[in-house]
Image: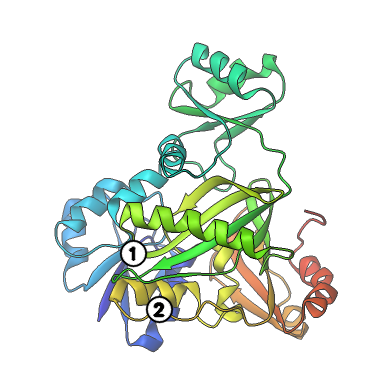
Amino acid sequence: MRIGILGGGQLGRMLALAGYPLGLSFRFLDPSPEACAGQVGELVVRDFLDEEALRRFAEGLELVTYEFENVPVEAVRFLAGRLPIYPPPQALAVAQDRLREKAFMQSLGVPTPPFHPVETLEDLKVGLEATGLPALLKTRRGGYDGKNQILIRREEEAERAFWALGGRGLLLEGYVAFDREVALLSVRGQGGEVVFYPLVENRHQGGILRLSLAPAPGVSEALQRKAEDYARRALMALDYTGVLALEFFQVGEELLFNEMAPRVHNSGHWTLEGAETSQFENHLRALLGLPLGSTAPRGYSAMVNLIGLRPDFGEVLRLKGAHLHWYGKAVRPGRKVGHITLRQDRWEGLEEALPRLVALAQVPVGP
């Protein structure tokens, strides 16, 4: 059985590696001939909007999924008229527009930071009066890993930020003094079965995820249930199939929705060694209508991204409980080229080994 994946990055690569034990094979579509998923499956190098390429790509496939949320919705809808594609196109359309995303979650009764659409300088002025300062001005589309957004601290910075981001199609968000950032991964199967992974604590630098702790320390049962309730609302509203990641700001025992990703997610990489069933396998199980696997954690895990550096593999593997994932990508500044998962049976063991792990990955100290 052959599965098609739009996008050929490391998420597609890990999906393929999880799928081969299930007897699956994979074909990827990506504009780059250097896409790292091509090392583990057939790679079709064409533009996502090339309809002839999409037709050829679809031949002989059982179904299609995607591994990043900036795939053109037009390509997904084109393929949806020919074979099953999961998650559904409407989920991708919502996730690609920050304004639509926030409005969608608010319509489900999920709290968000204050926000205001910005198309003109007058809109920005009105928005700043509503949100107060500081505030984040973002493009509605195309941003990831902290890109395409500017923090406005003083009123005189507003107009410069407006023009720096293109002067239209923007979103202003009130700044949240959060305690920490957390993420929930949920999975919904074709038959409506839903499972949840435990909340994960995420630490970022420059908008890029650097460290995940799983399960997030100090999470109450009530907070986990609240996150699961919010995710379930989104899954049902979208008639969703596959893995859905929701990112939140935690403020006390409250959760404010930040972003969603309709795909397997960086904050779920720990599940490869740290959960009974990885997010990648569960995504494939969901698409194929197979029973979903247990999401129970196997002890305690930390995941660090390798950003623009190649560590000493020997030093990494000398660390007890460490597992190295190298994506086979050229090392460039700011580029995710791999990750390390550290798994321990006890939280105390993870705490003891964590300084060595973050040193190997050159993760900045502190939250």
Image colouring = rainbow
- Residue 184 location (% of width, % of height): 55, 61
Give SS at disc 1: loop
> What residue is pinned by disc 1?
241
Residue at the spot of label 2: 292
Quarter of the view holding residue 24: bottom left
Q: Is residue 287 left or right of residue 113?
A: left
Q: Amino acid at mark 1?
A: Thr
Q: Nearer the viewer, residue 191 or 336?
A: 191
Q: Quadrant of the N terminus?
A: bottom left
**Up-down relation of residue 197 to residue 239 (above or below):** below
Confirm or deny contact between disc 1 and disc 2 (CB under 8 A).
no
State the image coordinates of residue 144 (x, y, percent, origin top left).
Answer: 52, 46
**Where residue 97 appears, x then y in whole percent?**
41, 39
Task: Locate residue 152 relative to residue 236 in the image: left or right.
Answer: right
Q: Is residue 343 above or below residue 171?
A: below
Q: Does residue 318 lie above or below 27 as drawn?
A: below
Query: In the shown orientation, is residue 314 left or right of residue 255?
Result: right
Q: Residues within 10 Å of mark 2 (few under 14, many from 20)?
A: some
Within the image, what quadrant is residue 35 found in?
A: bottom left
Observer-nearest residue: 307 or 220?
220
The residue shown at (63%, 58%) is 223
What amino acid is found at the position of numbered circle 2 in the picture? Leu
Asked whether residue 333 appears in the rendered view, the answer is no
Q: CA distance from mark 1 to mark 2?
A: 12 Å
